[in-house]
Image (cartoon, rainbow, N blue to C red):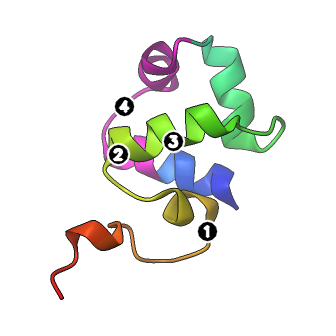
Amino acid sequence: MYFQRLKDLREDSDLLQRDVADMLGISQTVYSRYERGFQTIPVAHLLRLADFYGTSTDYILGRTNIPLPDTHIKK
């Protein structure tokens, strides 16, 4: 499921796969494989993407439907 979230986050930010791949320091082909679910995303890339999009790794991985991490929620 995370691959669909990656694509949605990228498209919502009006970015190309190339843009995100450049930020991660990888080729567009490798990033495309992440989005299509053909290659498992390394933890280091998952963490960078969560920081980049301002969301949590749990949201990207589909463990929650709340896009903002708990640190952004007032208690």
In the rendered view, tell whether residue 59 sits above or below residue 33.
Answer: below
- Residue 67 part of the magenta-drawn span: no
Q: Helix, strand, or loop for circle 2?
A: helix
Task: Tell me residue 8's x, y (percent).
Answer: 48, 52
Q: Is residue 44 left or right of residue 71?
A: right
Instruction: Identify the residue shown where x is 54% and y is 47%.
Output: 6
Q: Which residue is mark 4?
A: 15
Residues under labels 2 and 1: Cα distance?
Answer: 15 Å
Task: Tell me residue 66's x, y (percent).
Answer: 40, 76
Which marked residue is nearer to the observer: mark 4 or mark 2?
2
> Along the polypeptide, which appears first: circle 2 or circle 3?
3
Which marked residue is nearer to the observer: mark 4 or mark 1?
1
Q: Is residue 36 left or right of residue 51?
A: right
Q: Are marks 2 and 1 in contact (CB under 8 Å)?
A: no
Q: Quadrant of the C terminus?
A: bottom left
In the rendered view, tell whether residue 28 sits above or below residue 71.
Answer: above
- Residue 22 part of the magenta-drawn span: yes
> Along the polypeptide, which appears first: circle 2 or circle 1?
2
> Along the polypeptide, which appears first: circle 1 or circle 3?
3
Residues under labels 3 and 4: Cα distance?
Answer: 18 Å
Q: Check residue 47 in the rendering and tell me which mark sits there, or answer none.
A: 3
> Along the polypeptide, which appears first: circle 4 or circle 1?
4
- Identify the magenta region: 9-25
Q: Are marks 1 and 3 in contact (CB under 8 Å)?
A: no
Instruction: Identify the residue shown where x is 42% and y is 19%.
Output: 23
Task: Tell me residue 27's x, y (percent).
Answer: 62, 11
